[in-house]
Amino acid sequence: MIDTLRRELESGIGGEVRFDRVSRGLYSTDASVYQIEPLGVVIVRARGDVVHTVEIARRHGVSITARGGGTSQAGQAIGPGLQLDTSKYFNRVLEVNVEERWARVEPGVVLDELNAALRPHRLRFAPDISTASRATVGGMIANNSSGARSVLYGKTIDHVLELEVVLADASIAHLRALAPHELEAACDGQGLAAAGHRTVRTLARDCAEEIERRFPKVLRRVGGYNLDEFVDASRPFNLAKIIVGSEGTLALVVVAKINLVPLPIAKAVLAIEFDDLLDALAATPSVLRHRPSAVEVMDRFILDHARESPALDALRRGVLQTDGPGALLCVELYADRPGDLPPRLDALERDLAGSGFRCRWRRAETPEAQARIWTLREAALGLSMAMKGDAKSLSFVEDTAVAPEKLREYIDRFLQIVRR
Ligand SMILES: Cc1cc2nc3c(=O)[nH]c(=O)nc-3n(C[C@H](O)[C@H](O)[C@H](O)COP(=O)(O)OP(=O)(O)OC[C@H]3O[C@@H](n4cnc5c(N)ncnc54)[C@H](O)[C@@H]3O)c2cc1C
């Protein structure tokens, strides 16, 4: 059966089909603690390859797990059937509309490469995840990713305009915002796309109260299908929003039309050192009132790992005012005019001075000083994940979304559990 599957896949595909042991081994892991060896790997070149793969896999009753950069931390990029890799070839930027601020891209485009192509237009795709150098837009859509600046820009779902997808019956659907009369038309018919529109419309209508009551009201919630996007009848119905966050379980994205945002004009960072990590977390709700573009914390564990590399240690000493703070809270502000930043920094500092927390701060107003802070964060986090010796960092509690006002208590109790 496997030989037939491989031969059928190979006939008429523009990309690559790999069933050898090495390839299957390579594709058996992502960035999670799990490992599942796939039957084989299809490295697609174009949408026709995706349709071809779905048709054949369907006939053979074999599952498909799409894969972009494979940086997922919960095992959603690995599976026992076919791995469908978009990152090698299926990665072009198809169209950029600077005036209307959108782009059409293939799913395998890597975020950093997309943003490099957009930079001459002073635009970018807003969700700025820390794996931007290897994660793809397809993976970001399926995971509903968000990054350091989610307090300003939200999540990927807030920036997906339209999707072209391949459904389980190998049909192609174009999902976009529909006016009420268009939704009626989309719900009519026999195909899977019509069934999808009908199902989501019915669920959102019949369960609106339950969805409203039960869906957590936290910005970074990414778990589950996004039915909450469909309960407000005054907003256009856009089935693309149910694909976002579905981790490849509903459809395979072949083209995404995404929203773009302008690059910031002026930026400043306030690096706040706290004696105690829990104080840094307790200060976050009041920091958020100053409309930051990013709030990132580095605890002592991460900061101490910077000591392992002489270059990074020099960076650490340049950023910090004391040798071993409990935490460093980095608060970034964006503004349309450079002159708007100093009064906002003054106000934030006044709040901190009156907060009663044991903390001190320093402004980073030049691009170089800001780059030092973000470089320290990225490199020290990386080092802490790749510890020397037998003790290793292990990610096992992923993507918890906690309301800022509960963050201090959450981490306090979490640390107590881990220390037991
Ligand atoms: C150190 C580290 C830091 C991270 N930081 C962040 C962060 O700041 N923010 C964040 O949100 N995440 C973060 N992540 C998680 C991960 O990097 C992101 O979710 C990223 O967007 C995944 O992209 P990817 O291309 O690697 O997707 P993959 O891991 O390859 O796939 C992710 C999911 O998308 C599906 N998929 C891929 N392509 C398609 C397609 N064309 N159609 C349908 N489904 C598809 C896959 O089947 C899978 O379910 C981090 C991970 C690591 C290891």
Image (spheres, grey):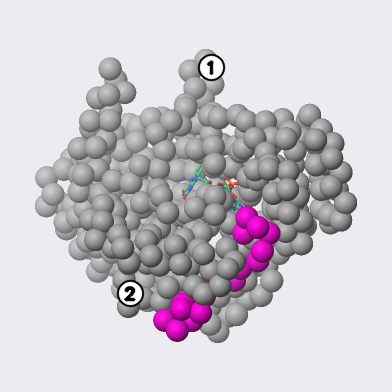
The residue to which callout 1 is attached is 389
- Quarter holding the N terminus is top right
Above or below residue 307? Residue 400 is: below
Residue 371 coordinates in the image, percent (x, y): 48, 53
Above or below residue 300? Residue 239 is: below
Residue 44 coordinates in the image, percent (x, y): 75, 53
SS at mark 2 in the image: loop
Above or below residue 348? Residue 57 is: above
Q: Residues within 10 Å of mark 2 (few under 14, many from 20)?
A: few
Amino acid under label 2?
Ala
Q: Nearer the viewer, mark 2 or mark 1?
A: 2
User: Left or right of 285: which side holds 9?
Assistant: right
Q: Over which residues does the magenta segment extend?
A: 167-186
User: Left or right of 376: which side holds 234?
Assistant: left
Q: Is residue 179 magenta?
A: yes
Label tally:
2
Above or below residue 112? Residue 83 is: above
- Residue found at x 66% / y 64%: 171
Q: Residues within 10 Å of mark 1 (few under 14, many from 20)?
A: few
Q: Is residue 143 magenta?
A: no
The residue to which callout 2 is attached is 233
Alpha carbon of mark 2 to alpha carbon of mark 1: how far? 56 Å
